[in-house]
Image (cartoon, rainbow, N blue to C red):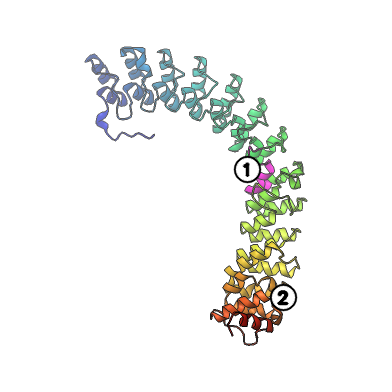
Amino acid sequence: MDFTEAYSNTCSAAGYAVKNGNVELLKTLIQKGYSLDIADNRGWCPIHEAATHKSLRCLKLLIHAASSAQCIDLKTFEGETALHLAAKCGHLKIVQILLKAGANLNAITNENVTPLFLATEKGDIAVIKTLLKHGARINGPHSACLWSVLHQAAYQEHLEILKLLLEKGADKQARDDYGITPLFLAAQYGKQESLRVLLQYGSDVNCQAFDKATPLFIAAQEGHVECVELLLSNGADANLYCSEDDWQLPIHAAAQMGKVKVLEFLIPITDRICDTGRNKVSPVYSAVYGGQQKCLKMLLQAGYSPNAQECPLYDCLSPLCMAFSRRFFAIVYILLQAGAIVTGLHYCYCLQYQCFHLLQFLLAKGYPLPLGSHLADVVKYGLLSEHQYKQWLPHLLLAGLNPVDLLSETWLNTASDNMLNFTLEFTNWKRLPTVVEQILYCRRANSTWVHQKYFEISESQEEIQREHGYI
């Protein structure tokens, strides 16, 4: 919370004197009995001003005049004591004076922050040594997110402090509210030197957060190449399961996030069972999902299959299906060139996303035409693209798709005249199935179909018309 001195008149007379370092005025106010515990709009009392502004003489006067030891540990609205403020500012002399006066060196703020944590954040090793000498608690949480002082030192990359804390017995495996250790934190934020120190002091290189993520996984995800190399050289396991819900390894994280340099390290040492193994997920899926063309090419060149196992995690039958569903058409071409298997489903994707150049490409390569259940989707998405039918329908029909397979009741009743007539051009319309002829006649009778003149009515259709009284 960022309090400001918006209302300066809320500051007490004693607070004003301390803020300005006016020792004589403060003496006078004390002699006259002015209160020393009146807070301003931030909850700050004179002792907080003295600690922040490094007013040694004012601080000594306040301590001497205080009616009880509790005044030393008065808290601001944020829960900070004078010792918190002095530690945060790196005022060693103030810290020493407060500790000698009996200040609580393990007091916590509203966010559960200790003076030692603030001194670590500041990077003031002299203050830290003083606090530790007087018995400051080194282990346990020192913040709302359960960070320890070791977490903070690693994050700030205060290496001298980091070593000091480790030598003083700081818990190398301390966990925050996500189960993250200081080493994990260093890997996550690319703090290579902190990582090196923690490894030298024996931190667990394969520690896992509560979601099973490892330092190697998070470093790979963030693309911290030097950290990845350092972790691997210290025994990090590239094949350690790294997710509570999804089957993921560091290679998946690197592939999805496009971390090419990291991927170069991981490809040779990752177990290939993840490529096509049952109930596993190929990193090819990860590269496709992230739209990472370069990573995908690297995986394919390294021998990963473009026809990976079915992936319930992503609800995809194949990487090619994922590429289509995410409309990554450049990746579709990469997979096709690598030998991805094409089915009728992929023609349906082309129509669904109106990617007609890809449909023409598939037909030109001679991939199998849609059959069976896929024909219903061809009809469905074909009707949605009827205004562009010249870009796909002729190509399908010329490639050998049986036009009769398109002439479902839906197609016959809703297709535009032009598209319907074009389809009939490719049929032996004198031998149309009876049900098709009947639907066509009804559509013409209702004046919803302007047919070509040479689409004559067959004898069988005439019989049907007579039977129903149309002629």
Residue 258: within the magenta?
yes
- Residue ID for mark 1: 221
Q: Count of labels shown?
A: 2
Q: What secondary structure is marked by label 2?
A: helix
Relative placement, left or right, of 281 versus 420 is right
What span is colored magenta in the figure? 242-261
* Badge 2 vs badge 1, beta-carbon distance below 8 Å: no
Crowding at dot 1, Cα within 10 Å, few <14 / some 14-19 / many 20+, comes out as many
- Viewer-closest of 145 and 410: 410
Above or below — where is 53 with respect to 414? above
Q: Quadrant of residue 174?
A: top right
Tell me what residue is drawn at x 26 percent, y 18 percent: 35
Task: Work out whether residue 433 or residue 10 is closer to the camera in this orientation and state it.
Answer: 433
**Pointer 2 residue:** 398
Quarter placement of the N terminus: top left
Taking the spot 63% from the left edge, 73% from the top edge, the residue there is 391
In the visual, does 285 lie left or right of 102?
right
| Residue 52 falls within the magenta-colored stretch | no
Mark 2 crowdedness (10 Å alpha carbons): few <14, some 14-19, many ≥20: few
Location of the C terminus (image quadrant): bottom right
- 299 relative to 465, above or below: above
The percent coordinates of residue 456 (x first, y second) are: 65, 86
> What's under tag 2, amino acid-wise?
Leu
Q: Nearer the viewer, residue 355 or 15?
A: 355
